[in-house]
Amino acid sequence: MDPLTTDASTRTLLSRWRAISANPAGLRPLRIGITASYTIEPVLPALGCFLADRGLLATFVVAPFNQIYQSLVDPRSALREAPLDLTIILARIEDLCGPSLRELSTLAPASIEAARAASRTEIVRLSAAVARYAQTSASPDVCANFAMTASTPLGVLDASHESSVSRLRSELNVLLWQSLASTSVVTLDVESAVSQFGATHAYDDRMWHVSRHPYSTSFGKHLAYWICRTITPLFVAPAKVIVLDLDNTLWGGVIGEDGIGGIALGDSGLGSAYVAFQEALLACRNQGVLLCVASKNNERDAFEVFDKHSAMRIRREHLSAFRINWNRKSDSITALSRELNVGIDSMVFIDDSPTECEEVRHVHPQVTVVQAPADPALAVAMLRAIPALDRVMLTSEDRARAEQYRVEHERKAAEPSADADPKELGAYLQSLELKVSVRRPTSDERARVAQLTQKTNQFNLTTIRRTEPEIDALLSDPAWRVFVLTASDRFGDYGLVGACIVHTSERVAIDTFLLSCRILGRGVETAFLATVLRDLSTVGSDVVHATLIETTKNAPVREFLPSHGFSLTPDGSWVRPISPEALGTPHIAIMNESAT
């Protein structure tokens, strides 16, 4: 079935939702709890359809109407008792702070500050309830901010009067954000959703009076799509790479025909639209998305633009890899995937040519293919509308990723060939001056650990996915030990690239063991295991168990257990002595002998 958009009719959405519910084959189950200050049920069929398009099968547990506090605090509430993968809190200031807003509309000078203070107190109360719920929840939590209303009691006077509802709403949004900033709660930006859609069309007073649902049918679909884009990155890894065409995509015109002085790229006219698009791409790069080029062009002509055009924002050093040749674009994408060691399904391809887009779509259906608009002024909006690029958390490793790949190119250049003499390979590994540190994650690193479990596919024993709250729960449970690995060499810092989770209560068992692909092939996985085993030698067991769950993507990890002293038992698990003495990595400096 083709993916649905917000233009789909209500009948189509309902029909699709019934079909999905009857035949959910291939979809990952996702149990979503929702508590709202208004009736949310009209939005759910569309939300279920949009989530299904991203591979998720939603089941909704909806708390009673307008019982947010009871749902969050009461241990016997539907949200507390149900096993949830996600909780969404949807509140409007009209519902939370109704008496205060009515007091503001009287314009009585003596009541204004008291009404504003009462509103702030209510938001602090809400924030505290959400934060307490998040502390005890093993799943992610999403809390909506407050949207503008269709109108205000003061009309045009609202912008300049001290009783302004709009100003109060902005202040309450800041207060909500500040109150939840130190938690793992994700903000659902309903304010932006209504603003982009248009408040006049977002609300339906008749729907509110009849069913206590405040939104129009058309905005309900828009809100469902907005919720989908916010929560999907918590369960589906975002794209890692944007592969770009050049002519009429990064600049206007054809460099081979128009020359560097004839292409559209500059501070005015259509040229400025291409500049804006490049700046938006660099913003993606700053969030950890790698930029690559796949172009049918002469390499010398193309790089003249990157190196010499004064208006060019993306420079050669911003590219993690490129294929500028006359080959099929699908072949170039295959080559880029191999060079960067990323999955084809983690790539977004942008090209202005419908023919090239169709060719890539046909050969690589896993790639997110997007045709660049004929009008370059629409390119930024096109980029920001790509769901595969959505992310709701940003770690220090994300921000450093593009630079890390640049450094990796330097490592690869120094690396001997695959058929090199073993002595030459040993000398290379020794020359890297590898250093690793294995320890417990800090509070700032828990999001990164969760991210690694969500996105690491190749060197991952079990591919068990975990959220940040789940990592928090494991860290506070004495029956579990969580380890992280950071690494560096003479070229630079790899960052936090490994995680291991071990259950130690009934038997010592490795639940999760994973490493980022870019650290493989240098013995770091051996050093990681050896250090973890040294730490586990204090738990009173002679052996450690492990599980290998084979997937279509984790072939690189399948020989790890047998090659590191593990033997397969009749029950299908792997076991080895807990002593790490046989695991030597003399070319790696272990910066801490204990992970505690």
Image (cartoon, rainbow, N blue to C red):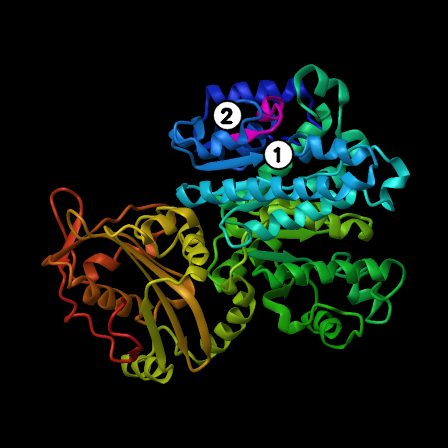
Q: Is residue 393 above or below residue 583?
A: above
Crowding at mark 1 (Cα within 10 Å: few <14, some 14-19, many 20+):
many
Against 70, residue 238 (above or below) is: below
In which quadrant will I find the C terminus?
A: bottom left
Residue furthest out toward the left: 542
Q: Between 429 and 197, which is closer to the camera in this rendering?
A: 197
Q: Residue at x 70, y 30 (%)?
A: 99
Return the residue found at the far top: 210
Percent x, y of residue 411: 45, 77
Towards the viewer: 213 or 521: 213
Res. 63 mark? 2
42 in magenta: yes
Task: Left or right? Give the position of 541 relative to 516.
Answer: left
x, y percent for residue 493: 45, 74
Residue bounds of the magenta highlight: 34-44
Identity of the residue drawn at 12% across and 57% down: 543
Q: Is residue 553 visible?
A: yes
